[in-house]
Image: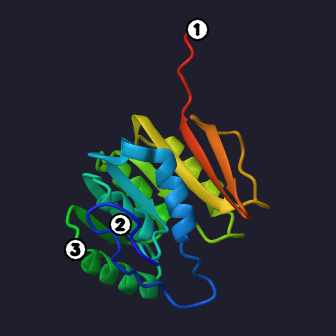
């Protein structure tokens, strides 16, 4: 695994060991950032279920202003912190904790992000639950986008709370679903 482009291009990243860990592949990260293009420059990025941190590190390398990584697993946290150090990129915070518990705290602290990326363990049911928590708070900036990496056999709903799916891209057995705030309807 490596950083694909930007300031840290080519730096090798470690992956946490274990069968439960499934780092986002170089191919999928390249596809994701091909879609996002230059829109990651100067933005705040939240990387949930961060694992190795590869997605958030890629965002920083490509000019992101700040990335907040959130991970619960101690082994993943060790690798994540090492990868952030190896990449040599500043403007980041690594938070430890359960995503569903930490997100409301971030909302109370008035944190907001341009992009929120989540890649929960496949088969856990955490993707729709996490989207629900994001939709219920003000974590997403007005023109922000939530990106969910999920297993193709675990489709996500078109709408969750005030979020609606604006795009979906399949890459083999993995899908990237993009959500934005639904436009307000005047009555």
Q: Residue at x 55, y 11 (%)?
A: 186
**Residue 119 in view in this figure:** no
Query: SS of the residue at dot 2?
Result: helix
Between label 2 and label 1, give the one nearer the viewer. Answer: 2
Tag 3: Cα neighbours inside 10 Å, few (<14), some, or many (≥20)?
few
Residue 102 percent across, percent down from the top left? 41, 62
> In the rendered image of this protein, does residue 86 appear above or below residue 59?
below
Return the residue at label 1. Answer: 187
Q: Residue at x 31, y 60 (%)?
A: 6
- Judge by depth and name the residue closer to the eye, 104 or 135: 135
Return the residue at label 3. Answer: 88
Distance from the alpha carbon under mark 2 to that under mark 1: 43 Å
Query: SS of the residue at dot 1?
Result: loop
Q: Which mark is residue 56?
A: none
Tag 1: Cα neighbours inside 10 Å, few (<14), some, or many (≥20)?
few
**Residue 166 in view in this figure:** yes
Distance from the alpha carbon under mark 2 to that under mark 3: 10 Å
Query: SS of the residue at dot 3?
Result: loop
Between discs 2 and 3, the one toward the N terminus:
2
Return the residue at label 2. Answer: 57
Q: Residue at x 58, y 90 (%)?
A: 18
Distance from the alpha carbon under mark 3 to that under mark 1: 51 Å
> In the rendered image of this protein, does residue 161 appear above or below residue 97?
above
Residue 158 percent across, percent down from the top left? 70, 39
Between discs 2 and 1, the one toward the N terminus:
2
User: Position of 163 compared to 55: left or right?
Assistant: right
Residue 91 percent across, percent down from the top left? 21, 61
- Judge by depth and name the residue closer to the eye, 36 or 66: 36
Between discs 3 and 1, the one toward the N terminus:
3
Q: Residue furthest top?
A: 187
Residue 115 percent across, percent down from the top left? 42, 48
- Res. 166 image quadrant: top right
């Amino acid at each position: 695994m490596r950083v694909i482009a930007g300031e840290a291009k080519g730096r090798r990243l470690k992956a946490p060991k274990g069968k439960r860990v499934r780092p986002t592949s170089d191919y999928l990260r390249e596809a994701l950032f091909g879609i996002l293009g230059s829109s990651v420059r100067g933005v705040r990025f939240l990387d949930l279920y961060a694992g190795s941190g590869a997605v958030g590190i890629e965002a920083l390398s490509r000019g992101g202003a700040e990335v907040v990584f959130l991970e619960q697993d101690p082994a993943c946290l060790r690798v994540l912190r090492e990868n952030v150090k190896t990449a040599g990129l500043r403007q980041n915070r690594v938070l430890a904790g359960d995503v569903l518990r930490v997100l409301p705290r971030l909302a109370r602290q008035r944190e907001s992000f341009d992009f929120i990326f989540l890649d929960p363990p496949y088969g856990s049911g955490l993707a729709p639950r996490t989207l629900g928590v994001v939709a219920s708070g003000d974590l997403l900036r007005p023109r922000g986008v939530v990106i969910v990496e999920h297993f193709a056999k675990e489709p996500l709903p078109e709408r969750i709370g005030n979020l609606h799916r604006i795009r979906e891209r399949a890459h083999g057995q993995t899908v990237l679903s993009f959500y934005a705030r639904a436009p307000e309807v005047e009555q």
